[in-house]
Image (cartoon, rainbow, N blue to C red):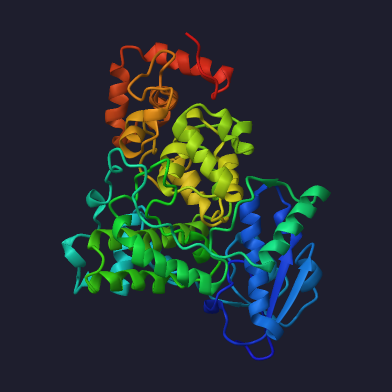
Amino acid sequence: MTAGRVRWIFAGQLGSLFDDGGPMLLIESRRALGRGPIHRTKAHLLLSGIRHRARELGDRVEFHQVDTYSEIVDDRTDLEVIDPTSWRARRKVRQIGATILPNRGFVSSETEFAEWAASRGAKRLLLEDFYREMRLRTGILMDGDGPTGGQWNFDQDNRQAPPKNAVSLGLPEPWWPVEDDIDEEVRADLDRWQAEGSVTLVGDDGPRRFAVTESEAHAALEDFVAVRLNDFGPFEDATLAGDWTMAHSLLSVPLNLGLLDPRAVVDRAVSEFHAGRAPLASVEGFVRQIAGWRDYVWHLYWHLGEQYPTSHNGLNARRELPIEFRRLDADAIEANCLSQSMRGVRERGWAHHIQRLMVIGNWALQRGYDPVALNDWFVAMFVDGTPWVMPANVIGMSQHADGGIVATKPYAAGGAYISKMTDYCGSCRFDPKVRLGPDACPFTAGYWAFLDRVEPQLRTNNRMAQPLAGLRRLSDREAVVAQERARDQLGEFTALIE
């Protein structure tokens, strides 16, 4: 803490990791919630987290509830900040002349990433290379110069389908936080602001399921380690309609609120492996998510620049997001996998990574939804959606709009993948094996229609050579493309009538 300075902390800096013991400034800005539609659960979590932190800090904090940050900070000359997590916020703190401290809250620093990126020269900045470098530098899951267990990843062990005929994984309910008077106050404020028209809220108002205080976050972490870490690896890509949590940690919200130190989270999981209580494959898969992918997309947010989310549309995707997406109207969607995934977003503002990538993202990719609008939708509708999290995930990985900067090929798949990794297809009116006719799965038929549409842009991509060769051999290609074009014209959620 700089002598004579007051530390302005943001909504992503609510934990002790960002507190060096001096006076603090915390601002709740209503305008930050009113820039566009936002999921009610997300708004609740942000406000609850800020207000709980203000209560914890007591006399050490100036806490203001105002319309805009400028009302409080524009005339201040005594502020310091730990560099915040968005381009917008960083511009603001520099504009007012605050003292800037290096960012915290990630396993690797921005300087370390910049040095690694510079050392790559013209080589692509691949996740796998970054992940190996991070482990070599930190010693996480390393035995000398080699990876623990002799492998850098255990993906082949961590891609199991859900147990056959299972309704759930059979694990106990996760630890849930207990709402208090602050949550009650937040709920009343959101009701009033929505009635006044100052905020636009989407989604259900369910009980709070995510940690917003440091003590809650550590309780959630310990519950995950004790109950679900062992099953996380094998079933991290699997989905069951009756088990929305599966073996996932549900730690993305407290991590993004700054309530947990990600290095400590990783070390906690690794300690379970060394104690013989957790399998290496599960622990490595969890480490890869936190210290690998999370750090990687954070650094890419800054490395790729502020214009990255709006300056790429390599597959010429221009369609407006349908009203069913914007309203989270799961009941209007016939494809069961998409309906179930959208229902999870509506009820909780959350879905796990395969539902995001291979169901919602895959659907949007196949139908050519505007990637900028889709990115904004993910930021606003997901409880862990932040401006730095989503661009590499949505613009890059999910929609391949950047032409291959983040991912080497589009993550497009037909109904066969969804049928293998979920139990959605058994109760769906569509057949994942059928691509033509009234029972044609919109993912299976949509996959071929997508390849037909983007073939000119992808024909030089070596990883797409086999799928495109399959497209050229498809005997009913023209009929499938015409069918999907008709489905789109009717409205993509309308069944075709024979």
Relative placement, left or right, of 135 versus 331 is left
Specify the farthest residue to the top. 498
Q: Is residue 170 above or below residue 99?
A: above
Q: Nearer the viewer, residue 157 or 239?
A: 239
Residue 208 falls in image quadrant: bottom right
Give the vertical position of 401 relative to 33 (above or below).
above
Answer with left or right where residue 315 lies relative to residue 64. Answer: left
Q: Position of residue 239 (x, y in %)?
A: 38, 43
Residue extending farthest to the left is: 150
| Frontmost residue, 230 versus 352 | 230
Is residue 324 left or right of 498 when viewed as pictured? Answer: right
In percent of the image, x 60 and y 38: which residue is there? Answer: 328
Q: Residue furthest right?
A: 196
Q: Please tell me whether residue 377 is drawn above or below residue 429 in the rendered image.
A: below
Q: Residue at x 58, y 42 (%)?
A: 372
Q: Image point 63% across, 46% down: which residue?
A: 204
**Residue 170 at x, y = what percent?**
34, 51
Q: Residue at 57% x, 18% y: name it.
A: 489
Q: Position of residue 222 (x, y in %)?
A: 40, 70
Query: Which quadrant, please, contains the N terminus?
Result: bottom right
Q: Is residue 318 visible?
A: no
- The answer to whether any part of residue 267 appears in the image is yes
Position in image of residue 90 (x %, y %) = 63, 66
